[in-house]
Image: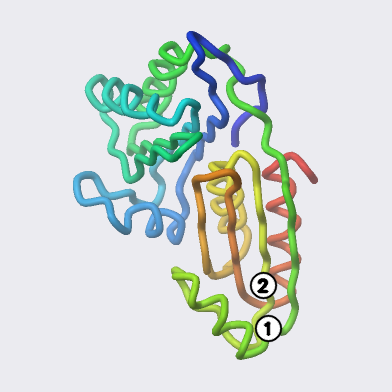
Amino acid sequence: MTSPGQSGGGGGNSLRAYVYVDKMQPAWAAYVGRDDRDGPALEGMSQLYVEVAPATLVFSLANAALKNTENSSSMLVAERRYGTLELHSANPDAVRQAGTIMLAMIGSSSAPGIAPSLVTTRVVSNVTGAEAGLVNRMGVRDRLREGDAMLVVETEPAAYVALAANEVEKQTSLRMVLVRLHGATGRLILAGSEAEVEIGHRVALEALGEG
């Protein structure tokens, strides 16, 4: 979990999200490590996402964090407005050290980032085969199936989706259908039984400070 704070700025730099994941759950770690060749993300590792503006600031942050700490990264994205960097390590202190270095570079306070905002949440019951086919065309991780219940969560800033996904996995066996971690908003789709979707909905709200 992470504590909501105020955005900081130094020389025009702005910290949008600072998302610390204490222990990655198995499915979440598998998602994070899907394209990570150098230091694969594994269950139980600690993780950090930072989202910043301007977007190109992530290049300097990645350079400093990876040179000076024992972390690996699975994600470096510089879009038009925002940049997002992911770091992970088996050593939680290394993740925190990287966070300290990056916060100093950004010029942020010790209570970092914009508090997560829940843009929207949807619970869809008894998905039809046609619906499942439409969603699965979006390039999903685990396929949506006919008869599933579906949970849709949209957050701002986008990186807070990671926190919701990992916390929901701690308490349910919902399948991770879709994850979008960067851009104007983040999106998460989970699927499973209606009972578990209801639990997942509650956990996601609590993780984002909406419970």
* Residue at 69% from the left image edge and 77% from the top image edge: 149
From this viewpoint, which residue is outermost toward the front? Answer: 80
The quarter holding residue 124 reads bottom right
> Which type of secondary structure does the marked residue at label 2 adopt?
strand
* Mark 1 burial class by Cα count in 10 Å: few <14, some 14-19, many 20+: some
Is there any visible trace of residue 48 in the rendered image? no
Tags 1 and 2 touching, CB below 8 Å:
yes
The answer to whether 170 appears left or right of 125 in the picture is left
Is residue 166 rendered to the left or right of residue 60?
right
Residue 95 is situated, as x and y percent measured from the top left of the image, at: 39, 29
Q: Which residue is mark 1?
A: 127
Judge whether residue 89 can be spotted in this image: yes
**Picture quadrant of residue 85:** top left
Expressed as whole percent of the image width and height from the top left, the position of residue 120 reads 74, 54
Q: Residue at x 75, y 68 (%)?
A: 123
Q: Residues within 10 Å of mark 2 (few under 14, many from 20)?
A: many
Distance CA(mark 1)–CA(mark 2)? 7 Å
Q: Tell me which amino acid carries mark 1.
A: Val
Q: Please name the residue that numbered disc 2 is placed on.
A: 150
Specify whether 88 is left or right of 168: left
- Quarter-of-image position of residue 17: top right
How many numbered discs, if any?
Answer: 2
62, 23: nearer the viewer: 62
- Taking the spot 43% from the left edge, 58% from the top edge, the residue there is 26
Q: Along the line of sight, which residue is nearer the eye, 200 or 62?
A: 62
Q: Is residue 45 above or below residue 63?
A: below
Most foreground residue, 10 or 87: 10
Quadrant of image for the N terminus: top right
